[in-house]
Image (spheres, rainbow, N blue to C red):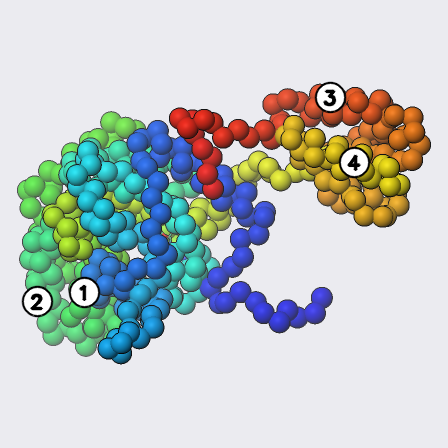
Amino acid sequence: MSEPLFRTPKGTHDVLPQDHQYMTYIKKAVRHRARQAGYKRIDTPMFESRGVFERGIGEHTDIVEKELFTVTGKKDNEGKAAEFALRPEFTAGICRAYVEHGMQQLPQPVELYSIGQCFRYDRPQKGRYRQFHQIDLEVIGLKDPSLDAQLIYVVTKILNDVRILDRLTLQINNIGTAENRQAYVAALKDFFIGKERNLPEEDARRLQTNPLRLLDSKNGDTQVLVRNAPKLEQFLSGESKQFHETLLEYLDELGVRYVPNPGLVRGLDYYNQTVFELWDQSTGAQNAVGGGGRYDGLIELLGGKPTPGVGFAGGMERMIWHMKEAGVRVPDKDQVDVFVAQLGPEAKKKCLALVSELREKGVHTLGALGEASLKSQMRLADKFQAKYALLLGKMEVKEGTIILRDMQAGKQKQIKYGQAIPQVIKLLGEKNLDTYVLRDQIGEVDED
Ligand code: HAM
């Protein structure tokens, strides 16, 4: 094969049909669990005003400082151009939509979910891409630990449905209120006075801009210092502690297993109180499969009335990786049931109708409508891994018959032409037919 002229940009990949089967499987689980729990689907644009993310996620977070894919619009008459960014996540955009559409008027909490592409201009490596997919759940408008617990419960259900929950641990922490953290950050800065020289350049800068990030620094020197630094726990108010204790009680009640992790802070600024992540049991914090938490100040930051919220996002590529590692087999919905082969102009005409009719009945059907010999058409049927083949030659047309071949067994028999469809359906089994009905208005619609 010659070298292709173009390839996907670094950090992106094509989702090929074999990977779509996993994606579809995950999406189904998400839609199913979301509907059960009253979440409704929302799709926000893939790009937003840059400010949505700068304000929402925080100017001094890695995501905004280093990883935003920015897009500059065209200059207007005054020579100004709008600044957009591709969404690095869903939460900020969904909260922007909540404010924009006056969703505070709706019965609260408003539960929304979304599935789609996100973009982060990070250095690509295993499990980290510049374009990736997230599943996202948000519960906006009420504050109660039972909402955090229920959200986490739904998340564990989804992960269990796709059979990867037992490969993960749920790490959970409470990072207090904004005031709790302010007091803590002041203490942390005090502690580091005179120690800045021992910090790597990036962490020294973070000490000024976003000191909490030092807590989950990957740098060994920083980690040693952090071990002796004051602990966030000591600065949590009674209210925060109570909130967390109640949440953990609810999780116990729901049978959700978790690992309390006082060092967990998360990389987005909008969090307060609950934060959680799903870690790979063997690799820990690296390549978390998902994460989330409470963001009671975010909507106000985006111009709305103070409105609490809690949510979660999972990375689909990382979920798929785990599914493959765990040997999870997803149904192959693209299999070919019947391959229709024909020879001669009369047969070809009849086959056109036969192929359409089989498809209408829910049989996945391919037809070789070219001019190749029957033998090479059979080879094609084999390559497509068709379960059955129907062969119609000049003789069969004349006799009103057709040949039905079991491709795996390599056996064939001549049957009446009119028997072709009923026989195929019988062999495949009614329940395996791919019939799809848009249920009238009230039913569920199996959207993509
Ligand atoms: P996050 O932890 O930044 O949280 O991302 C959630 C998940 O998206 C990660 O755990 C990971 O699986 C996946 N992910 C993130 N970046 C990449 C990447 N570059 N390549 C592949 N996968 C990636 C959020 O995005 C928050 N919005 C979660 C949330 C929702 N909090 C409240 N509501």
Pointer 2: what residue? 190
- Vertical placement of residue 445 versus 218, above or below: above
- Vertical placement of residue 310 versus 36, above or below: below
Pointer 4: what residue? 351
**Mark 2 neighbour class, 10 Å CA radius: few under 14, some 14 to 19, many 20 or more:** few
The residue located at (16%, 60%) in the rendering is 228
Looking at the rendered structure, the kind of residue marked 1 is Asn
- Helix, strand or loop status at disc 4: helix
Q: Is residue 243 visible?
A: yes
Give the CA separation, mark 3 to mark 2: 81 Å
**How far from the left and from the top, in percent, is residue 384?**
73, 43
Give the CA separation, mark 1 to mark 4: 68 Å
Pointer 3: what residue? 422
Q: Nearer the viewer, mark 1 or mark 4?
A: 4
Give the CA separation, mark 3 to mark 4: 16 Å
Please indicate whether residue 261 sits to the left or right of residue 448 in the image.
left
Q: Nearer the viewer, mark 3 or mark 2?
A: 3
Looking at the rendered structure, the kind of residue marked 2 is Asp
Q: Nearer the viewer, mark 3 or mark 1?
A: 3
Give the CA separation, mark 2 to mark 1: 14 Å
**Mark 4 neighbour class, 10 Å CA radius: few under 14, some 14 to 19, many 20 or more:** many
